[in-house]
Amino acid sequence: MTIAEQVDWLSILVVHGPNLNLLGQREPGVYGLATLDDINRWLESDGEKLQAKVSPVQSNHEGALVDAIHTALGQHQGILINPGAYTHTSVAIRDAIAAVKVPTVEVHLSNVYRREEFRHHSYIAPVAIGQISGFGSDSYRLGLQALVNYLRQVS
Ligand code: DQA
């Protein structure tokens, strides 16, 4: 790739929260059979078509996720995040997204609004541009597309 071609590329941080490392074997009836590696590969390949370099990170620890979000400052133009169970509990992750002010799309494999009531509230949604929930691994792919479209419109 030439330098001229690289100039228009966006850099997107993809953040996967707790237990998502077990995708493929974790409650497949709810979360599907795709593994985290599958999802990351699909995002990488979609990203190439969208001229967006995708950098995935996964952690089961809230502080590590906060640290990862901080790395977006000055390094990534957008964040695609599935905060997992921290969606429903974490003021720290919400504050990190608000602090870095990097446009963020929240995604969920399952439709959290059709599930237990404790999953209906998201601490992240008010600081995200938008949320996509319920389309399995396509939630990530739709989220990446929406984030890139948003970034191209504002830049
Ligand atoms: C999830 C939904 C959360 O409620 C749950 O705790 C997860 C995964 C999803 O992708 O559907 O870990 O974020």
Image: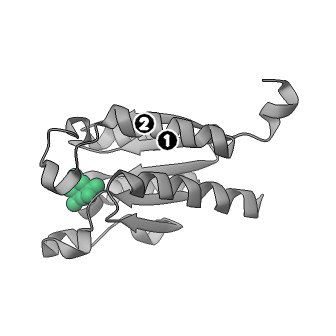
Disc 2 marks a residue whose amino acid type is: Asn
Q: Is mark 1 within 8 Å of ligand 1?
A: no
Please say if 91 is above or below 68. below
The foreground one among 70 and 107 is: 107
The N terminus - image quarter: top right
Which of 35/15 is in front?
35
Regarding residue 4, the answer to whether it shows in the image is yes
Q: Which mark is residue 43?
A: 1
Coordinates of residue 48 in the picture (x, y in percent): 63, 37
Q: Amino acid at mark 1?
A: Leu
**x then y, percent, for residue 78:** 59, 50
Locate residue 90 relative to residue 125 in the image: left or right: left
Q: Where ligand 1 lies, by quadrant?
A: bottom left
Label drawn at residue 126: none
Mark 2 Cα within 10 Å, few/some/many (few <14, many 20+)? some
Residue at the image point whose x is 56% and y is 51% from the top: 100
Q: Is residue 51 left or right of residue 45?
A: right
Q: Residue at x 44, y 72 (%)?
A: 126
Residue 40: assigned label: 2
How many numbered discs? 2
